[in-house]
Amino acid sequence: MPIKPITDTIHAQGTEITVVSAPNKDDFISLTDIARHRNSEFPADVVKNWLRLRSTIEFLGLWESLNNPKFKLVEFDQFKTESALIKTSGVSALLTPLLLCYPAFFLLLPT
């Protein structure tokens, strides 16, 4: 029988943040809960804006290359390059978790 993950909360600067822990695995914290500290009504907007930053894209690529043996660095580098070109052309790129995992679904959204 699989062992169920443990869900707990931590408190930071008056914000309750969900933490999910599975035995012998990594812990996960809720970015949405952290974003609620900045915008309690629309935390998803905070996360979307964070995912648009070049530094975030570079951080996620580095983290994946260090922690994910199946990470496709060549595809990610192409995605990162296209993302930079799109921003300079006046069109905004929106990175979502789905697009990070499946870059073939890359979408362009007009600004």
Image (tube, helix red, strand yellow):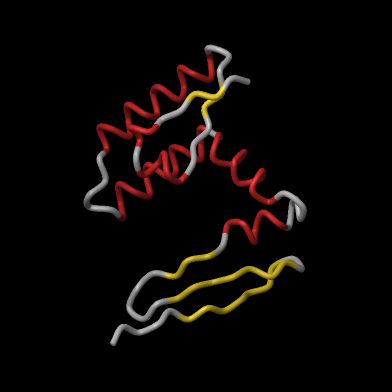
**On screen, residue 63 above or below 89:** below
The residue sitting at the bottom extreme is 1
Residue at the (53%, 15%) spot, across then down: 88
At x 53%, y 12%, the residue is 89
State the image quarter where residue 30 is shown.
bottom right
- Residue at image position (42%, 44%) is 98
Position of 59 compared to 41: left or right?
left
Q: Is residue 87 above or below residue 13?
A: above
Q: In the rendering, at what x and y percent does residue 18 appear?
A: 59, 70
Q: How many marks?
A: 0
When asked about the image quadrant of residue 100, the answer is top left
Q: Quadrant of the N terminus?
A: bottom left
Q: Residue furthest top?
A: 89
Find residue 36 and report its horizontal and vertical position in percent: 71, 57
Q: On the rendered structure, is 92 left or right of 22?
A: right
Quadrant containing the C terminus is top right
Is 109 drawn above or below residue 32 in the view shown?
above
Q: Position of residue 51 (x, y in %)?
A: 54, 40
x, y percentage for residue 11?
A: 68, 73
